[in-house]
Image (cartoon, rainbow, N blue to C red):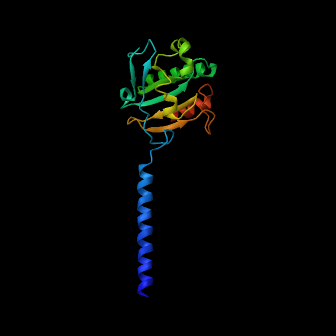
Amino acid sequence: MNNLTSTRCFIATLMLSMACTASTLAQNQPLSPKQPGAPWPDWELADFQPKSPRFNETYGRSHFHGQVTFVALLATWCSYCKTQIEKMEEMRKEFSANRIEVNFIVVNIDSGASEQDEFTSRCSFPLFQDTQLVDAFGLHQGGKDDYYIYNERGELSDFFPYRGNRESDLASPEGYANVKQA
């Protein structure tokens, strides 16, 4: 009988120990950059937008801390992206007219570096040029046409993958409304 009690105590202690270890391991696992609450990846890139106050400067998330920020991963050679950037500019102006402060930024895919003027004429917000060395697309674990919305603390509040479950094409009324309400 005493041996049975010892075995039960040992098993209970072992199970409690395993539960505590699993809980600790789960807490130490970093969030995917696409999960709500995940921090904005720490990158710094050159701003190629001549209309931007920090044109030709290299900077990143620390500059936008304290404000909601809409980050789009786009490509200058993509006609869909050109329409999206024009709609982003329209949304930025709507927010500004209503005194709502939201930063809009685009990260241009590395392969689009030679066609930057395709974006600069379509908007006035910061445009960042991704590089193979920095790989902001990889740090976000995103693809072309993905949208990330970060809160004032730099935490992901919403993610819109291209062709995801929710419409996010800014040229469609539904997609525009979905992203704007996020």
Q: In which image quadrant can residue 22 be found?
A: bottom left
Residue at the spot 62% in from the left edge and 34% down from the top edge: 167
Residue 133, given in percent of the width and then of the height, sits at: 47, 25
Q: Nearer the viewer, residue 31 or 92?
A: 31
Question: Residue 118 at x, y = what percent?
Answer: 56, 13
Rendered view: 7 above or below 108: below
Residue at 45% of width from left, 53% of height from top? Answer: 26
Front position in the image: 51 or 55: 55
Could you tell me residue 164's position as x and y percent? 62, 37
Identify whether 23 is placed above or below 172: below
Query: Which picture quadrant has residue 77?
Result: top right
Q: Residue at x 58, y 35 (%)?
A: 161
The residue lying toward the viewer, choosing from 107 and 101, is: 107
Residue 159 at x, y = what percent?
Answer: 53, 37
Q: In the displayed structure, would residue 16 be above or below residue 96? A: below
Left or right relative to 44: residue 114:
right
Q: How many numbered marks have been drawn onto this rendered protein structure? A: 0
Going by the picture, which residue comes out furthest to the front?
A: 3
Name the quarter where the N terminus is drawn.
bottom left
